């Protein structure tokens, strides 16, 4: 963008479009992305279906400003269950994912399996397990543990791979794999592993809240009910409770308190299902596969395919929303990062924008989308707004931290000059890299937003489960996972390289 | 000293040494090297950075891996672990994996005693429980030497193990190394030390072994030839090199090699 305009003009004044500087390449890249989004916007259903969204928004804000603390019923049970599920789910993910991380570099099969289980959102896993284990703690734990095992395997493997080789090489020969790992690899990576696990636990808290949307009695359950029934003061109180929970994490999530929380949480977890082995086996071996496929009846399979919803439209909507969400996040991030950065504004504006950003970034997309949906009615618009705002705020926050570390070379420039000449050229490659990291997450969220009534793949998956068409739902889940893996591969190719972002806590 | 007719511990006869690279031809650093190492020799390995010292030491380590204690250039220490654990790693293969794991939780009795004795000798007394990341550069250097000593081998291979300790300490550490190993090959930059405290000098320059002679037959001037920069300095400012005694016999009177790295 502006980087290109300050690049030296080529000799024959062909303009920046053909310039070969890295800045011009990034600018072409960005403008191409935005142009693609603009061309495709007419295909998206962005209509507002409610009559008076502003009045509804006013009521919601009033609810936020004057929350009704007194009307909450047993908020502490919900809070405790939310924490217990997140804690035990993450722990189970670590236990499953760590051994996989050790095999990750060596086995293509493990890498593929991890990519697959990662690509399916926690809520979809919950929907799947709910069919067998019902609304139980087991469903919730598995829904978190399984995708997290895939994520941990990948990220842990990356962290372990980056440990310096010198200590390993210095060991005497014939040390044994286990001893070598515990003496010369694990200690070097431990701090980073713990930091990532903490970050994942925070994600687990948000996911645990969301599990309430499909009926598990966590904080999200009460939130959804209160919002749906228009009891905004109560919803406001629950939202504040959620923000307090996230903001106070450094205190209650102290490492000395974790064992205590684990024991206490185990007591809160429940109810436990009575697992019927035969039923489970039937579900895995028969229910989720098309009957015709199991019978080897290819003509019947053709007929089965006609029962599928219009796949083209569903996939198209998912990809379109993913693209619009990514571009929206880019624009939001470009507009927001200066507000939270020490080079612009005064203490007041920075504090205020910090507050807004923390709110946007700690509210899960699904919850934001749900709120916008109540305001605007079921179209792509609320989903787009939610994706753009949440991810944009997250990227803006990280970019602002990056910009804070920059000391401008020319003091006394005007604010726009500082933005365009000093800071943006420095932080922009990082911003774009973050955006591509998030693109995969955005697509995964896009599918899940279907559960709110937006016509993405998730809509049909939930419909499949609702009508007990497990084979259709499972097939669509596979399509979703495949789509995610493809987009992940694509975004990895497009991502700017040589960017100093070592932090693994963005995925 | 040099064993007359006994076979060498290791010998290279016109071999190309280098490091292997993935999917490419090996990078040859020391072409056509001819060299013998005999038991009981104390060898100083000299040469400017990049001359191939580390390559030669790596090749020696590869051939002698069972007999050689190894002290690498970048120490190869694990900063998060304590001094005790880092030194203990020298004998990691001698314990079972289970014992090694338990040792991380609670130090094993015998190794704990042995390592503490070693720490006293190295001037690291009372630091056994301190994480290595909290130590100074010189202290880390001594931990790395301690780890090599703890391996209790007959042969010591060190890649600049005396680089970041003060000259007095360098002499003490060298004495400790010599006392516990029959044969030593040590890369270093202190030329005076090479002439006074070693039997033999190997000098590398640009991938060639240009010096392979008893230390008693060499002068500092001979060693200067290993460092191209030293010649520039000689022509540039004569004063600096005049201030240095150039006879090897003078060296014996010097307690240490302060300021002549």
Image: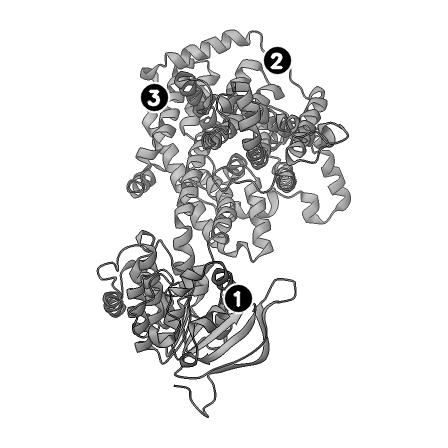
Q: Nearer the viewer, residue B220 or B25?
A: B220
Q: In the displayed structure, does residue A182 sit left or right of residue A492?
A: left
Q: How far from the left and from the top, in percent, is residue A327? A: 62, 26
Q: Chain of mark 1?
A: B
Q: Chain of mark 2?
A: A
Q: Which residue is mark 1?
A: B51
Q: How far from the left and from the top, in percent, is residue A506? A: 50, 37
Q: Chain of mark 3?
A: A
Circle 3: element type:
loop
Asked if disc 2 and disc 1 are in contact, CB closer than 8 Å, the reply is no
How many residues crowd mark 1 within 10 Å: few (<14), some (14–19), many (20+)?
many
Q: Nearer the viewer, residue B66 or A300?
A: B66
**Screen quadrant of the N terminus of chain A:** top right
Q: How far from the left and from the top, in percent, is residue B71? A: 40, 67
Circle 2: element type:
loop
Q: How far from the left and from the top, in percent, is residue B172? A: 28, 69
Q: How much space separates mark 2 and mark 3, taking CA atoms?
A: 34 Å
Q: Which mark is residue A355?
A: none
Does B157 appear above or below A161? below
- Which mark's residue is nearer the viewer, 1 or 3? 1
How many residues crowd mark 3 within 10 Å: few (<14), some (14–19), many (20+)?
few
Q: Which residue is mark 2?
A: A48
Instruction: Determine the image quadrant of residue A242.
Output: top left
- Which mark's residue is nearer the viewer, 2 or 1? 1
Q: Are marks 1 and 3 on the same chain?
A: no
Q: Nearer the viewer, residue A186 or A467?
A: A186
Q: Which residue is mark 3?
A: A73
Asked if residue A241 shows in the view, the reply is: yes
Q: How much space separates mark 2 and mark 1, taking CA atoms?
A: 74 Å
């Amino acid at each position: 963008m502006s980087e290109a305009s300050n690049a030296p003009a080529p000799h024959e004044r062909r303009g920046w479009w053909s310039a070969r500087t890295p800045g011009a390449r990034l600018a072409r890249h960005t403008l191409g992305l935005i142009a693609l989004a603009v061309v495709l916007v007419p295909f998206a259903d962005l209509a507002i279906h409610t009559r008076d969204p502003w009045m509804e928004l006013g009521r919601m804000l009033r609810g936020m400003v004057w929350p009704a603390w007194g009307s909450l019923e047993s908020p502490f049970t919900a809070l405790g269950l939310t924490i217990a599920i997140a804690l035990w789910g993450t722990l189970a993910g670590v236990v499953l994912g760590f051994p996989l991380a050790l095999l990750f570099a060596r086995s293509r099969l493990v890498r593929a399996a991890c990519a697959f289980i990662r690509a399916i959102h926690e809520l979809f896993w919950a929907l799947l397990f709910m069919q067998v284990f019902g609304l139980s703690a087991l469903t919730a734990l598995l829904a978190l543990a399984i995708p997290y095992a895939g994520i941990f395997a990948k990220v842990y493997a990356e962290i372990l791979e980056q440990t310096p080789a010198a200590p390993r090489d210095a060991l005497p020969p014939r040390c044994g794999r286990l001893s070598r790992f515990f003496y010369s690899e694990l200690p070097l990576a431990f701090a980073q592993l713990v930091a990532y696990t903490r970050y994942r636990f925070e994600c687990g808290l948000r996911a645990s809240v969301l599990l309430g949307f499909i009926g598990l009695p966590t904080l999200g359950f009460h939130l959804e009910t209160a919002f749906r029934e228009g009891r905004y003061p109560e919803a406001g109180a629950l939202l504040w409770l959620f923000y307090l929970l996230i903001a106070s994490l450094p205190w209650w999530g102290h490492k000395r308190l974790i064992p205590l929380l684990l024991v206490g949480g185990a007591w809160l977890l429940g109810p436990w299902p009575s697992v019927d082995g035969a039923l489970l086996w039937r579900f895995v071996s028969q229910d989720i596969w098309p009957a015709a496929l199991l019978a080897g009846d290819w003509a019947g399979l053709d007929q089965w395919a006609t029962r599928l919803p219009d796949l083209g439209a569903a996939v198209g909507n998912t990809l379109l929303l993913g693209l619009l969400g990514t571009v929206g996040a880019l624009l939001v991030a470009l507009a927001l990062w200066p507000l939270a950065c020490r080079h612009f504004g005064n203490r007041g504006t920075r504090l205020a924008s910090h507050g807004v950003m923390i709110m946007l970034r700690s509210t899960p997309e699904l919850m934001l989308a749900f709120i916008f949906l109540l305001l605007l009615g079921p179209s792509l618009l609320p989903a787009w707004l939610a994706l753009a705002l949440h991810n944009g705020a997250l990227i803006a926050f990280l970019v602002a931290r990056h910009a804070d570390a920059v000391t401008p070379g020319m003091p006394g420039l005007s604010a726009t000059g500082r933005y365009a000449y000093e800071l943006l050229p420095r932080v922009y490659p990082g911003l774009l890299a973050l955006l591509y990291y998030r693109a995969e997450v955005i697509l995964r969220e896009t599918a899940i937003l279907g559960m709110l009534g937006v016509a993405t793949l998730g809509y049909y998956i939930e419909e499949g489960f609702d009508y007990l068409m497990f084979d259709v739902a499972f097939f669509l889940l596979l399509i979703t996972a495949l789509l995610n893996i493809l987009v992940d591969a694509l975004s990895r190719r497009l991502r700017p390289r040589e960017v100093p972002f070592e932090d693994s806590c963005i995925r | 000293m040099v064993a007359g007719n006994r076979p060498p511990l290791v010998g290279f006869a016109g071999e190309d040494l280098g490091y292997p690279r993935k999917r490419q031809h090996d990078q040859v650093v020391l072409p056509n090297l001819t060299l013998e190492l005999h038991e009981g020799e104390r060898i100083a390995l000299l040469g400017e950075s990049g001359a191939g010292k580390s390559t030669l030491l790596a090749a020696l380590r590869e051939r002698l891996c069972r007999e050689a204690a190894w002290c690498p250039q970048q120490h190869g220490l694990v900063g998060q672990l304590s001094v005790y654990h880092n030194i203990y790693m020298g004998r990691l293969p001698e314990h079972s994996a289970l014992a090694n794991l338990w040792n991380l939780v609670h130090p094993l009795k015998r190794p704990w005693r042995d390592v503490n004795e070693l720490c006293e000798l190295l001037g690291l007394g009372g630091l056994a429980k301190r994480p290595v990341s909290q130590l100074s550069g010189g202290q880390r250097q001594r931990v790395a030497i301690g780890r090599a000593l703890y391996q209790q081998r007959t042969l010591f291979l060190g890649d600049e193990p005396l680089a970041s300790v003060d000259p007095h300490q360098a002499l003490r550490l060298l004495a400790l190394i010599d006392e516990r190993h029959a044969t030593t090959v040590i890369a270093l930059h202190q030329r005076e030390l090479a002439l006074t405290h070693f039997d033999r000098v190997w000098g590398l320059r640009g991938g060639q072994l240009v010096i392979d002679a008893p230390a008693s037959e060499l002068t500092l001037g001979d060693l200067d030839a290993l460092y191209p920069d030293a010649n520039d300095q000689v022509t540039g400012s004569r004063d600096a090199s005049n201030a240095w005694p150039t006879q090897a016999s003078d060296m014996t009177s010097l307690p240490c090699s302060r300021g002549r790295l």
